[in-house]
């Protein structure tokens, strides 16, 4: 199969499918299976002594299993190109979460606007880990916006970055890392040691994607204030990564994120990001939709274009063009053929 097509076609088809469909709740999804695997491993290992090492062992086993599974399935399907492309495209679709992310955020905004604060709190609880029972309308909207910016990195840009470097196996590996962090990467008594390795691995995996996300948000919206917010507040967050896209969005909207919130009944004081404690309006979610769609589109196109350039450049290096063996050709001609490069055929009479 053509190397460029093998890389680009599943990427574009998966992106288009996510753009059109999102993640229908009734459909099977690999992350649900990931969650079951993590839950089973947690019940088996998260007890007794040496919990850090047990959590690290579980993390490495699951990550290695996922990467190897997708690597060998793709290898096995290479003799059937249609099956290979179908399999790869479907799982790129599953790995991207931009459409569903925006759907969930908009649903909270719309529910709050149309049905009131109690309904808004209940709908928000579907997508955030904080306690929502006492949140004000302003706090509900802020929670949604924080989640949108953080998950633009975690649910879209980071998987795409892993796809760019490691292909589909790397993309699905990232989804396992992120799912592990979301399930066991907490600092409470139950997971403080058991989930520490998974949490640190997730920090490493998201270090570059989070900063790419913030920079693209700033560039595509054209906000100098967002740039200053990112520099000033990006490293103030408790997470080494989440603060950067959150600071970028707070700067774009000129509002304030962060502050105290309750998680599992425990008060957590997060640093503030921004200073303008203004009310967020219902229609401002349209800005978030534009930013998310624009960032996703640009990342997909840039990755596809970069891959095309790298492969084209590799096939057109002078040493490649001149090192092909001469073979016999009809009518007394000799062709020096560079595979996948039909333009470099040298004829000698």
Image (tube, rainbow, N blue to C red):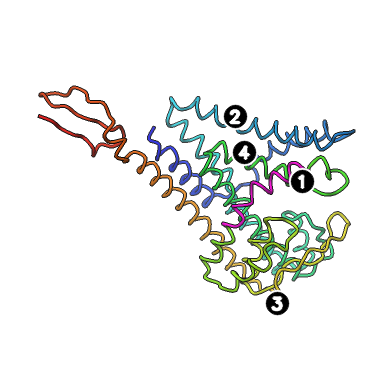
Tell which of 313 and 148 is nearer to you: 313
| Residue stretch rendered in magenta on the structure | 196-212
Distance between mark 3 and mark 1 Cα atoms: 31 Å
Distance between mark 1 and mark 4 Cα atoms: 16 Å
Q: Residues within 10 Å of mark 1 (few under 14, many from 20)?
A: many
Q: Which mark is residue 111?
A: none
Q: Which mark is residue 185?
A: 1
Q: Secondary structure at mark 3?
A: loop
Distance between mark 1 and mark 2 Cα atoms: 24 Å
Q: Secondary structure at mark 4?
A: helix
For label 2, the residue is 69
Earlier in the chain: of badge 2 and badge 3, it is: 2
- Does 225 sit left or right of 196 as displayed? left
**Can you tell which quarter of the image residue 346 is in?**
top left
Earlier in the chain: of badge 1 and badge 4, it is: 4
For label 3, the residue is 276
Distance between mark 2 and mark 3 Cα atoms: 49 Å
Indicate the quadrant containing the N terminus: top left, top right, bottom left or bottom right: top left
Residue found at x 43% / y 25%? 79
Residue found at x 60% / y 29%? 69
Earlier in the chain: of badge 1 and badge 2, it is: 2
Q: 148 above or below 6?
A: below
């Amino acid at each position: 199969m053509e190397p460029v097509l093998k890389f680009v076609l599943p990427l574009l088809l998966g992106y288009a499918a996510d753009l059109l469909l999102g993640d229908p709740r009734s459909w099977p999804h690999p992350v649900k299976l990931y969650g079951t695997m993590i839950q089973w491993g947690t019940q088996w290992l998260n007890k007794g002594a040496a919990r850090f090492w047990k959590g690290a062992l579980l993390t490495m086993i699951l990550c290695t299993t996922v990467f190897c599974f997708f690597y060998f399935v793709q290898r096995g399907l290479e003799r059937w190109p249609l099956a290979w492309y179908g399999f790869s495209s479907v799982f790129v679709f599953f790995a991207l979460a931009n459409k569903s992310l925006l759907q969930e955020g908009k649903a909270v905004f719309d529910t709050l606007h149309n049905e009131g604060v109690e309904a808004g709190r209940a709908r928000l609880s579907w997508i955030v880990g904080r306690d929502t029972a006492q949140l004000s309308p302003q706090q509900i909207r802020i929670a949604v916006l924080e989640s949108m910016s953080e998950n633009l990195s975690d649910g879209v840009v980071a998987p795409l970055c892993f796809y760019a470097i490691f292909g589909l196996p790397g993309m699905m590996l990232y989804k396992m890392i992120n799912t592990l962090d979301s399930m066991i990467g907490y600092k409470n008594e139950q997971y403080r040691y058991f989930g520490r390795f998974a949490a640190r691995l997730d920090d490493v995996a998201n270090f570059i994607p989070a900063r790419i996300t913030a920079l693209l948000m700033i560039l595509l919206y054209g906000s100098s204030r967002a740039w200053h917010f990112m520099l000033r507040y990006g490293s103030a967050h408790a997470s080494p990564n989440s603060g950067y896209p959150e600071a970028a969005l707070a700067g774009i909207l000129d509002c304030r994120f962060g502050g105290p919130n309750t998680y599992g009944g425990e008060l957590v004081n997060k640093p503030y990001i921004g200073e303008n404690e203004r009310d967020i309006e219902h229609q401002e979610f349209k800005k978030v939709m534009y930013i998310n769609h624009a960032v996703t589109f640009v990342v997909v196109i840039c990755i596809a274009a970069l891959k095309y350039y790298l492969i084209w450049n590799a096939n057109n290096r002078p040493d490649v063009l001149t090192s092909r063996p001469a073979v016999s050709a009809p009518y007394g001609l000799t062709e020096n053929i560079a595979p996948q490069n039909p333009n470099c055929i040298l004829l000698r009479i």
